[in-house]
Image: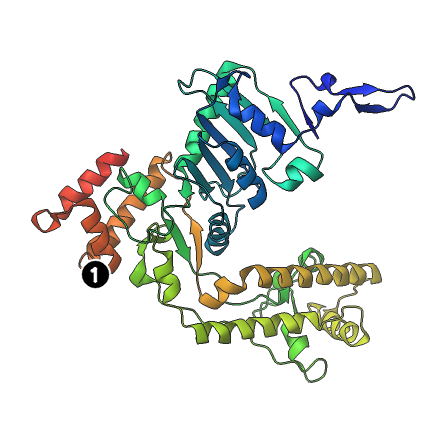
Amino acid sequence: MFYNTKFEHFLEENEDGEVQRKNEESFLSLSLLCDKMKNVHGKVKSHNIYIVSCYYSINSIQTLLDSLDGRKVHIIISALGHSQEKIEEIIKDLKKIEKNRNKKIYVCSKFPLLHSKIYYAENERADGANCLVGSANLSENGFSNNEEVLVDVEDVGAKQQIKSYIKKLIEQSIDIDRFTDFCVNDNSFSDFMSFISAGYIVFRPNNQIQLNYSGEKLREIAKELKSDVENGTRNSELSIDLEKYISSKEYLNFKINTKIKSGARIKDHCIETCFGYWLPYGKHHDILNVCDDGEIKKKTDQIENVKAGLMKIDVDSKPFQEFLEKFYASIKNGEQPVYISDTQKTEIAKDIKTFITRQIKYIDNRKNSIARGFLITPIPYFWDDRCAAEEFYNSFWENVDSRKYKGIAKKIWEYFEKDYQKKNWTTLKTKANMEWE
């Protein structure tokens, strides 16, 4: 682990021609990072410190904050592309950290695949800065176990661009201290665009777990076959029904039901738009609370039962091979049976194994959202696309207009116009429209 501005500074060859580090100073450590963040150019005390990290550890963040006492510290952590439930889990974990009001921690939810690692310290006048970029996360692995690099950025223009990038990240992030404020207040957002962007999109995932295998090898076979017009079949949809194998008395005789009934009613808590159901910032708990725990448990058990059925399939077993042979025998080109080579059968069996593994992983990742009947995700940034912004805007206000005396629509009306009873919707919508135009 090392950092330097020039890579030749920290590597050299020994007498045996082996490449090695020159000295211990080239090793990256958390204490060395703290020293770099404390003072700008080694002599002026830093005032504002900004850290962007994909992964983190509580101990590393706590050590850094304790070392940088008396300075304003802003730490931005990636949401790692996870669902709203995982974001909440990350925030709950980060809330364990002891800090004062000068220390801010954010979870970047609008760029869920954020993978940057930046360590930036500036003086009080913001006319001088230390900036390190590289591969090291703010974690034990990043500064103790892994082989990582952080490089000093010396170019002033590059530092200014990095500072602008960090500010943009903060604007698109959740302040964990505000996360428990589950009601919209007038001081939360400056305009309509930021109000919308801070919310979430809620949609219903596919409530049927797919157990029909129709892989590439089957599609190749299907292309060579004629469609049976008389019987209304299309060979391009050739597929192997694994649910039939699992449930068949002839084979596993393991009863499953892959159709999961829809979950809780979400319309009462959201605004319907062209992108899906929009949920305001801080209101996700309202929609989670409408779910009946007993019903979720029942659906979760049903989903686990489907997973158990998949795990019972042994693709190499004699019963499954017999099941496949029956399927192959049913494939006909017109009236003629189709020859499937041993090579094709081997490739299909291998592909089915991959398909089963993928479906089991899908069930593990989506079990909660399938059981609830909906998935909460950050809203995409679309404001630079004029057509998309107008389409969203029109669909949003159309739905609010139709439900303005009820639930969340009324809250939104109150948010944009305190004396809404004296105003008409044209005035209110014009005000919101001006703010994002």
In the figure, 68 relative to 401: above or below?
A: above
Q: Residue at x 23, y 44 (%)?
A: 186
Q: Between residue 370 and residue 292, name the one nearer to us.
A: 292
Examine the rendering and report whether any part of residue 191 can be seen: yes
Q: Which residue is mark 1?
A: 406
| Count of numbered badges drawn on the protein | 1
Q: Residue 209 at x, y = what percent?
A: 56, 67
**What residue lies at 47% left-to-right and 16% top-to-bottom?**
128
Of all residues, the one furthest to the right in this rendering is 16
Q: Amino acid at mark 1?
A: Lys
Residue occupying the point 46% across, 33% down: 73
Q: Residue furthest left?
A: 422
In percent of width and height, residue 229 lies at 58, 67
- Which image quadrant: the C terminus? top left
Find numbered disc 1 in the image and state the secondary structure of the residue it sits on: loop
User: Is 175 left or right of 358, judged from the image as shown?
Assistant: left
Residue 205 against residue 314 in the figure, above or below: above
Decide which of 76, 427 is in the foreground and name it: 76
Q: Residues within 10 Å of mark 1 (few under 14, many from 20)?
A: few
Q: Is 358 on the left-hand or right-hand side of 116?
A: right
The answer to whether 244 is drawn above or below residue 161 in the figure is below
Whether residue 134 can be seen here:
no
Residue 227, given in percent of the width and then of the height, sits at 62, 64
In the rendered image, which quarter contains the N terminus?
Answer: top right
242 over 379 or under it: above or below: below
Front position in the image: 423 or 121 = 121
Residue 48, image x, y percentages: 44, 27
